[in-house]
Structure formats: C-alpha cells, structure tokens
Image (cartoon, helix red, strand yellow):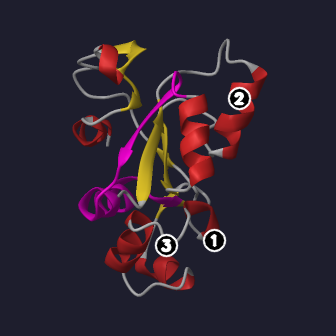
C-alpha cells in the first residue's frame, strides 16, 4: 500500500470550474506543472479522483523524493534549500526529510521554511501520450504508472 502520492497538475487555469479550482487550491496546485507530495488518506484519494481530468498522480519512492528536493525544492525568495533549512524544519539531512515525506509521516505544508510545492518545467521532448485523456485511454491524466519517467524529464 502506498504511503504518499506525487501529484502533478497538467492542465492550465483556463475554463476550470469553481468546484475543481477549489479542490486544486486545497491540494496546493494553483498553477500548471506544479507538483506536491501528499500523504495517502481516504479524503486525499477522493480529492484526486474528483479532479483527475486536470492532474496526474503516482505512488512516490524515496529516490524520486530526494531528487525532487535536491533539484526543485525552494524556500522563500525562490532560493534553493540548504542544510540549514532542513535543520530548521527538524530533520538532520535531506535524506531523512525525503524518507519521512515518501512514507507519508509529514505533509509538505507542515515544513515551514520550505515551499509546499515544486515548480516543474514542461517535459523535455514533450509528452509521449495525450494530455487530454486518462492513463487507461492512452493519456497521462489520472493515476499514471509511468509518472516517474515523466517527472525526470520535467526536472
């Protein structure tokens, strides 16, 4: 059973209904190509399914979490995370922070000096599947089993 999900918003902000926009804002996914790590709970899975036509998600492992924190983790002023910031958050190393995030012990919103989301770029060489369809229909939206390869191209 998964402990935490990596969630990425794929669709933009235009023509999004109010109810979906509210749910996406609660998930800290205000803009396109933002990513968050959220612990798995019943209500979060329901929220993801409710707005699955705007985002994609997958269970996250420790290596991907550490790579995201190293490359795309930011603090206020959009500066990179340092070891000092990690120690302010109550962790000894970035590895320890990545482990607790991927095991679902802590949420990104609870870590104070670090921003609760990762700003990603569009994927290098583009999307290989349709961005208008769910994963089961040869698209990238919804529960995507190939999201880690896509994320590596977006970092």
Q: Are marks 3 and 2 in contact (CB under 8 Å)?
A: no
Q: Is residue 85 magenta?
A: no
User: Which mark is first along the chain, 2 or 3?
Assistant: 2
Q: Secondary structure at mark 2?
A: helix
Front position among marks 1 and 2: 2
Residue identifier under label 2: 21
- Structural distance between the alpha carbons of marks 3 and 2: 27 Å
Residue at 22 percent across and 22 percent down: it is 125
Q: Is tag 1's residue or tag 3's residue first in the polypeptide sequence?
A: 3
Give residue 41's position: percent from left, percent from top: 55, 56
Q: CA distance from mark 1 to mark 3?
A: 15 Å
Q: Which mark is residue 112?
A: 1
Above or below, 148 relative to 113: above
Which of the image's four quarters has the N terminus?
Answer: bottom left
Quadrant (top left/top right/bottom left/bottom right) for the C terminus = top left
Magenta range: 52-74
**Residue identifier under label 3:** 105
* Position above or below: 27 against 99: above
Q: Name the one closer to the observer, 45 or 16.
A: 45
């Amino acid at each position: 059973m998964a402990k935490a999900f990596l969630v990425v918003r794929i669709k933009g902000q235009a023509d999004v209904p109010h109810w979906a926009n509210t749910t996406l804002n609660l998930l800290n996914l205000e803009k396109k190509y933002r990513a968050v790590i959220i612990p798995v709970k019943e209500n979060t899975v329901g929220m993801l399914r409710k707005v699955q036509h705007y985002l994609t998600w997958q269970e996250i492992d420790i290596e991907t979490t550490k790579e995201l924190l190293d490359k795309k983790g930011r603090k206020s002023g959009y500066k990179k995370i340092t070891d000092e910031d990690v120690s302010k958050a109550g962790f000894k190393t970035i590895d320890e922070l990545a482990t607790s995030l991927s095991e679902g012990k802590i949420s990104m919103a609870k870590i104070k000096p670090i921003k609760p989301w990762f700003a990603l770029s569009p994927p290098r060489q583009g999307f290989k599947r349709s961005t208008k369809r769910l994963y089961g229909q040869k698209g990238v939206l919804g529960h995507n089993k190939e999201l880690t390869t896509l994320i590596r191209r977006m970092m």
